[in-house]
């Protein structure tokens, strides 16, 4: 192939050079030109002839690349309709089209199975949650069923919000309920393997009181560092939470129910399309 192309190029240069020098007769020029056109036609046959196209299509069929195989076979039928290869191509293009249809059916089946699996995961995840709809903000709020509806309970939990067509977002919350104020300034969390500190700024820990009881709570959007803490809490056997106040502190153990509640919210969050790359 390379030699033929080089030969064609050489003849082209000869024709151009001889004519410009006036050293060739019209007869010789016509002979060289005819030979050049003949060689060019042969070269095109080698590159774009029915045998070449059919061979290429069969390679695509063997590789199960049926879309490209169909394209090559259709090109052969369109450019060489009277050839023997076109007759074979008509048979093979039916094979390619059938395989393409089979692929589409399989892809649709896989897609449907994924959708059904996702729906099942979503149903399983949200059945463990308490759901509250806010029609003013058009937001649905999700809480684990074990989480108290009220602030006057000790709690270490997550909850999430989701608008109708949006992706969910997570919030992290710690509640402290007692008889006396701590005026919490930070939290220390001791897991099986790590010690974490969550520092708060002025006004971030909210307070309230009623009937002799006091409540202090911290509610904030989920962050990368908080996500790491939550995952470690879930996977630890023993977790101690210390609420550090202005003068005193109060310790308690994070319960297994609270850990499961954290996991239930995370499962539902991911099932609803939430991302964990905070």
Image (cartoon, rainbow, N blue to C red):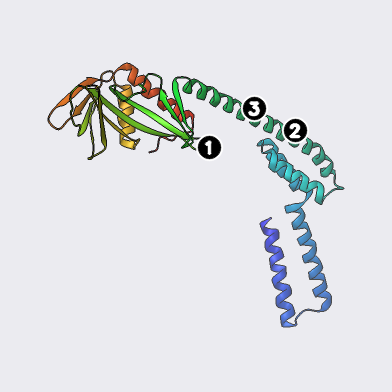
Q: Nearer the viewer, residue 42 or 66?
A: 66
Upstream in sequence: badge 2 or badge 1? 2
Give the camera-side residue of 63 and 22.
Answer: 63
* Residue 204, percent from left and from top: 26, 37
Residue in the picture at 43% in, 27% down: 142
Give percent across and percent down for residue 97: 75, 36
Tell me if 153 is positioned left or right of 17 in this view: left
| Whether residue 48 is situated above or below residue 12 in the rendered picture | above
Crowding near pointer 1: few (<14 within 10 Å), some, many (20+)? few
**Above/below status of 58 relative to 254:** below
Q: For mark 3, what is the residue? A: 109
Q: Earlier in the sequence, mark 3 or mark 2?
A: 2
Mark 3, Cα crowd under 10 Å, few <14 / some 14-19 / many 20+, is few
Camera-nearest label, 2 or 1: 1
- Of residues 8 and 273, the one nearer the viewer is 273
Sequence-earlier tag: 1 or 3: 3
- Choose mark 3 or mark 2, whichever is in front: 3
Secondary structure beneath label 1: loop
Residue name at image x 49 percent, y 30 percent:
272
Helix, strand or loop status at disc 3: helix
Q: CA distance from mark 1 to mark 3?
A: 26 Å
Q: Give the quarter of the image for residue 17.
A: bottom right
User: Residue 98: which numbered mark, if any?
Assistant: 2
Quadrant occupied by the N terminus:
bottom right
Q: Mark 1 — residue?
A: 165
Describe the element under mark 2 as helix, strand or loop: helix
User: In percent of the image, x 74 and y 47: which residue is there?
Assistant: 53
Point out the frontmost of discs 1 and 3: 1
Q: CA distance from mark 3 to mark 2?
A: 17 Å
């Amino acid at each position: 192939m390379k030699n033929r192309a080089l030969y064609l190029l050489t003849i082209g240069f000869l024709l151009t050079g001889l004519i410009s020098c006036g050293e060739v007769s019209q007869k010789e020029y016509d002979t060289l030109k005819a030979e050049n056109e003949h060689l060019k036609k042969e070269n095109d046959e080698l590159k774009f002839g029915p045998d070449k196209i059919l061979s290429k299509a069969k390679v695509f069929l063997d590789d199960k690349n049926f879309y490209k195989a169909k394209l090559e076979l259709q090109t052969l039928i369109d450019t060489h309709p009277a050839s023997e290869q076109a007759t074979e191509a008509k048979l093979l293009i039916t094979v390619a089209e059938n395989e393409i249809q089979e692929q589409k059916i399989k892809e649709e089946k896989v897609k449907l199975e994924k959708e059904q699996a996702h729906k099942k995961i979503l149903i399983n995840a949200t059945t463990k949650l308490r759901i509250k709809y806010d029609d003013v903000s058009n937001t649905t709020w999700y809480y684990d069923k074990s989480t108290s509806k009220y602030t006057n309970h000790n709690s270490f939990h997550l909850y999430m919000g989701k608008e109708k067509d949006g992706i969910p977002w997570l919030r992290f919350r710690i509640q402290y309920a007692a008889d006396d104020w701590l005026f919490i300034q930070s939290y220390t969390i001791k897991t099986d393997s790590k010690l974490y500190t969550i520092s708060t700024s002025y006004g971030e820990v909210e307070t309230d009181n009623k009937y002799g009881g006091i409540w202090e709570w911290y509610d904030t959007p989920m962050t990368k560092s908080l996500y790491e803490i939550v995952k470690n809490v879930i996977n630890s056997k023993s977790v101690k939470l210390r609420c550090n106040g202005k003068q005193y502190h109060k310790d308690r153990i994070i319960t297994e129910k609270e850990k499961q509640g954290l996991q239930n919210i995370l499962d539902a969050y991911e099932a609803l399309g939430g991302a964990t790359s905070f």
